Amino acid sequence: MPPYVIRTLPESELDHRLVAWLLDNNSSDPNSKTNRLHVLAMANKAVEAKRELEWQEGRRDVMESIMKSKKNEYKHDGKVLKR
């Protein structure tokens, strides 16, 4: 992973405040801010994946209903779908 700037500091803050900030954002500590942000990002991805899966299952149900139907036109969500 390429290096990137995560924080810029004035020279006057290069002391115990920097060490405190680094310890607060330690990724190996489960209570750190960085780790919480990582967990939130993973949770957001999981929710989005679940939403996508539910949408795909809904579309699959609609397509199965259309294929089983003997109609040539099928109306769903205000749209007319043709065989």
Image (spheres, rainbow, N blue to C red):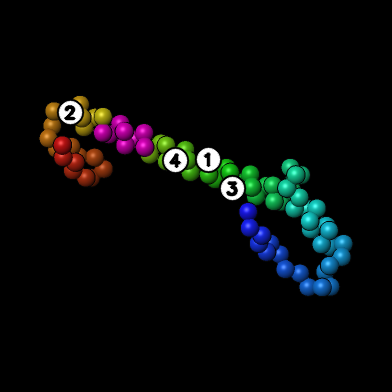
Q: Residue at x 20, y 30 (%)?
A: 67
Q: Earlier in the sequence, mark 4 or mark 3?
A: 3
Q: Earlier in the sequence, mark 4 or mark 1?
A: 1
Q: Which of the labelled discs sits on residue 41, or is there none?
A: 3
**What amino acid is labelled 3 in the image?**
Ala
Q: Residues within 10 Å of mark 2 (few under 14, many from 20)?
A: few
Looking at the rendering, in which quadrant would you find the N terminus?
bottom right
Q: Residues within 10 Å of mark 4 (few under 14, many from 20)?
A: few
Looking at the rendering, in which quadrant would you find the C terminus?
top left
Whether label 2 touches label 1, CB < 8 Å = no
**Residue 11, position in %: x, y?**
82, 73
**What amino acid is labelled 1 in the image?**
Ala
Q: Earlier in the sequence, mark 3 or mark 1?
A: 3
Q: Residue at x 80, y 53 (%)?
A: 23
Whether label 2 touches label 3, CB < 8 Å = no
Q: Which of the labelled discs sits on residue 46, or is there none?
A: 1
For the stretch drawn in magenta, the main secondary structure is: helix
Q: State which mark lies toward you, 4 or 3.
A: 3
Q: Which of the labelled discs sits on residue 69, or is there none?
A: 2
**Residue 63, position in %: x, y?**
26, 33
Q: Which of the labelled discs sits on residue 51, or is there none?
A: 4
Whether label 4 touches label 3, CB < 8 Å = no
SS at circle 1:
helix
Label 3 – label 1 distance at C-alpha: 9 Å
Q: Which of the labelled discs sits on residue 80, or is there none?
A: none
**What amino acid is labelled 4 in the image?**
Arg
- Residue reaching furthest to the bottom: 11
